[in-house]
Amino acid sequence: VPVAALIWMIVQARRAKRFSGSVPCGGKAYARRVLALALGYAALLMLAVWLNKHYTLSGPTAVIVALLPALPLIGIIAAMARLIVETKDEYQRMLHVRQMLIATGFTLAVCTVWGFLEEFGLVMHLPAYWTFVLWCGGLAIGTIYNEARP
């Protein structure tokens, strides 16, 4: 998921560079941060799955191993917040904020509807970590909205 978000961000940065001749302020640092965190996520996820498969984990050790893959994802959220702070151009900052607001609204709406459907036994239960995946999909919707409406 973070890799897909990174690819989307790279496509958008290249597109911005093609139209304006330069990468938006903070874009390169953001890309480096997200790439490092995405690679960290992949490595920690593989490690956690491997440890869980090969060892009987319990107690605090199980909690720590289960939380390992979440840490880089939280870092990606922090990197996005930092991108907003570091973006000096007010218009670009507004586009980032609007994209994230759309993603958040989309995620809240889908999770609310899914929760009621699940409560009535109409859909299967999904683990809560899929919320981040959904939010990344919402970022794509926010990007499309930003492109359609300046």
Image (cartoon, rainbow, N blue to C red):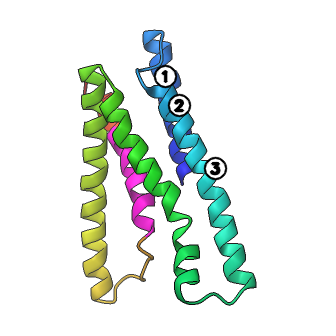
Q: Residue 142: where, in percent of width, then height? A: 32, 41
Quarter in which the C terminus is drawn:
top left
Q: Which residues are magenta?
A: 129-142
Q: Please, what is the three-letter code of the amino acid marked with disc 2?
A: Val
User: Could you tell which of marks 2 and 3 lies nearer the N-terminus?
Assistant: 2
Instruction: Look at the numbered discs 1 and 2 and tell me whether their residues touch, using CB distance below 8 Å.
Output: yes
Residue assigned mark 1: 15
The main secondary structure of the magenta stretch is helix
Give the camera-side residue of 130 and 52: 52
Q: CA distance from mark 2 to mark 3?
A: 18 Å
Q: In front: mark 3 or mark 1? A: 3
Residue appearing at x 58%, y 90% in the figure: 58
User: Could you tell which of marks 3 and 1 lies nearer the N-terminus?
Assistant: 1
Give the camera-side residue of 79 and 147: 79
Residue assigned mark 2: 11
Q: Quadrant of residue 65?
A: bottom right
Q: Residue 8: where, in percent of width, then height? A: 51, 39
Q: CA distance from mark 3 to mark 1?
A: 24 Å
Q: Residue 100: where, in percent of width, then height? A: 30, 44
Q: Secondary structure at mark 1?
A: helix
Mark number displayed over residue 39:
3
